[in-house]
Image (cartoon, helix red, strand yellow):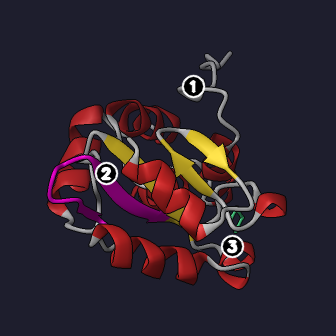
Amino acid sequence: MPVLHAKPQAPTDDKRWKIVETRMRRMGDRPAALIEALHAAQEAFGYLDTDALNYVGDTLGVPHSRVYGVATFYSFFTLKPQGEHTCVVCTGTACYINGAKDILSGLEKALHVKPRQTTADNKISVLTARCVGSCSLAPAVIIDGEVKGKVNVDDLVAQLEAM
Ligand code: FES
């Protein structure tokens, strides 16, 4: 009888993991899906932390060392936000239509940061993600892991400036 291995558990019950899981499953949960899966995780969360790298590796049957090797080799992967706080702006279709572009330009104007950059005082890192799974709340951002919906640019800037 073949030994069945338990499916690795997502690091948290954050529903964005479902998006990543679906992408991995569609690719057959195989090692060849590694780059695609890392992209999916980065798009969902804005960056790849250790838990994300290990989970993707475990799901696809890729050794952690190889996952790290790939994630650090390609410059389009970000392993961690540099700032004290992260603001991930969703640029998926629903959010884009509902003003994600205005949010990004508002952040650039007020805080002088573009996506994948951190403010000069190292307080806020701005990242983008493609659909964070809260389309009904578009435009959505995630501040330090917490989803904020129906975002108003001025309120967002005020909130970030107060951090
Ligand atoms: S497009 Fe932004 S949450 Fe889905």
Cα–Cα gap, marks 3 and 2: 21 Å
Q: Earlier in the sequence, mark 3 or mark 1?
A: 1
- Which residue is painted at 30% across and 65% down in the image? 116
Judging from the image, what secondary structure is the residue with disc 2 in?
A: strand
Label 1: how many Cα within 10 Å (few below 14, some 14–19, many 20+):
few
Residue 10: % across, % down: 58, 29
Residue 89 visible in the snapshot: yes
Q: Nearer the viewer, mark 1 or mark 2?
A: 2
**Is the residue 8 above or below the residue 154 in the image?**
above
Image quarter in which the N terminus is found: top right
Q: Earlier in the sequence, mark 3 or mark 2?
A: 3
**Which numbered circle lies on residue 8?**
1
Which of 49 and 159 lies nearest the eye of the viewer? 159
Q: Nearer the viewer, mark 3 or mark 2?
A: 2
- Which residue is painted at 31% across and 67% down in the image? 111
> To which residue does mark 2 refer?
124
